[in-house]
Amino acid sequence: MERPVPVPDAATAPYWAAANEGRFVMPRCTQCGRWHFYPRALCPHCSSEKLEWSDCSGRGTVYSYTVVHRAPSPAFAAELPYVVAIVEVEEGPRLMSSVVNCAPETVRIGMKVRAAFRRVADDTQLPVFEPA
Amino acid sequence: MKLNAAIAGVGTSRVGQVADRSALQLQADAAQAALADAGLRMTDIDGLLTTPVRVEHWNMPCGVVANHLGVKASYLSTVDVAGASGCAMIHQAAMAVATGQASAVLCVAGQNLLTHGSRAKAVKSMAEGGSAHPQFEVPYGPIVPSLYALVAQRHMHEFGTTPGQMAEVAVTLRRHASLNPNAHKRELITVSDVLKSRMITTPLHILDCAIVSDGAAAAIVTSIERARDLKKRPVRLLGQGYGLRHSHIGEHVDLMSTGAVDSGRGAFKSAGLTPTDIDVAQIYDCFTITVIIELEDLGFCKKGEGGQFVEGGRIGIGGELPVTTHGGLLSGGHPGLGGGFFHVVEAVRQLRGEAAERQVRDAEVALVHGNGGVISIHCTIILGRG
Ligand SMILES: [Zn+2]
């Protein structure tokens, strides 16, 4: 059974295209200068439509995490236990991701992490994080 | 503003594993029970509210249910604010009655969620079709409890809340369910049972999570004058509020403050009451951590003190603030979106003094709180003896 793969839409295609090239990007408002995530039509801070995709540093900290012991579908069963985390990136926004390349029990809130990529399909890489 | 509306009847179907009833049959059972409770007939009903179900595809659920029950409706709608739908249906029915669009609105929700699919199937359909963002969350493999586990872990980090305190919620609500003949899970459990139960997604064990059940609940809302002429003592809607801070947990600005702050503030303001006026609180309990955070955000204790608040029998029947006295989603029953409607039914029974062994003495004002998504969308209602 295949892992669920993100299906990009017009609003999110640049994010997934960048990830597939190994670049981690987020939307930034050119009016107020602030970043946000997830992508949306209007800046959540100032309601401007003037948004652009910008490269992020990829540096962040673990805001919260959970070690998953029960898979949502057979596609994830072989990976148990694994970490699902909310990472706060240096630019401000948070996003859900995984923390990889370390034992799940070593993950902590406040831990410094950096972006990495995991290939889940021929044309899709997921942004993930590893200890910095 | 107080609306001229009251709850005149409530009812539930059998709850638990009810293999011999379809979703519509369960809803019909609950509706008939509510009609009998009020002393009304289906022909007296001219408004209908319901919620979507997960077990079947219903094109326009309110039309399917109204047609199945034979309701000739001058007002009907499908309410979907996820787990907050139970509370929201009461408020929306009250608005329909107060504006004269309908004279008696039947609110009904529920389904055969347990019988329809195995638990594994429910877990998968909730993870992929439920509260997780399809592009930005589902690919990382969270189950629905993981989304709440992220909240719980942060709460533990910021405030020192413990797994034992979360377990207290499960233990107390199971004790309440043991006093409810129609509850799904009635065998008593201990804190140690919860902590030793299977770890699902840290820090949540299986006994920190809501169960999956078959069942339906219903209520009838009419004007106060009409309700006074009916069989049972009316229960008034005193106030209500809504709140939304995020749609997905990964993007939440501050996980430690939820839309329950706003919905609670709105409800207390419209009712002209404060948390100290509440005699019994039917708090949405999809997970143990949910109850702790909602008690804080609704103002029953300070932020960060919810873990201590649920200890020492304070939220048990006979305690300072009895919480979710029918056993809730953790033990009473959880048939999906209709789950939160049992909290409303229980509040009405408490205010009428009909809760038998579960009765909270002198209960005159009840708060009911529903939350949906991942502690995302909230509706709080306050009910009082009419
Ligand atoms: Zn902006």
Image (cartoon, helix red, strand yellow):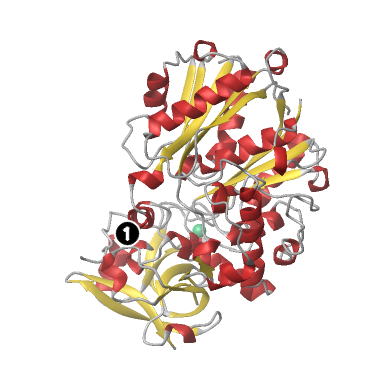
Which quarter of the figure has residue B227? top right
Does mark 1 have its CB less than 8 Å from ligand 1? Answer: no
Disc 1 sits on a residue from what chain?
Answer: A
Q: Is residue B294 above or below residue A113?
A: above
Q: Nearer the viewer, residue B153 or B266?
A: B153
> Which image quarter holds the C terminus of chain A?
bottom left
Q: Is residue B362 above or below residue B300?
A: above
Q: Nearer the viewer, residue B186 or B46?
A: B186
Question: Percent position (x, y) of residue B22?
Answer: 36, 34
Name the residue at the left extreme: A122
Quickly name the residue at label 1: A12
Which quarter of the figure has residue B193? bottom right
Query: Helix, strand or loop at disc 1?
Result: loop
| Residue kind at label 1, given as amino acid type | Thr
Q: Is residue A15 left or right of residue B214?
A: left
Question: Percent position (x, y) of residue B35?
Answer: 56, 20
| Residue drawn at x 36%, y 87% as measured from the top left | A101
Q: Is residue B381 above or below residue A3?
A: above
Question: Percent position (x, y) of residue A114?
Answer: 42, 83
> Which image quarter holds the N terminus of chain A?
bottom left
- Count of numbered labels shown in the rendering: 1
| Residue drawn at x 50%, y 40% as measured from the top left | B15
Q: Is residue B212 left or right of residue B165?
A: left
Q: Is residue A36 something one can see in this rendering?
A: no
Question: Percent position (x, y) of residue B187?
Answer: 57, 55
Which class describes the residues within 10 Å of circle 1: few (<14), some (14-19), or many (20+)? some
Q: Is residue B372 something one can see in this rendering?
A: yes
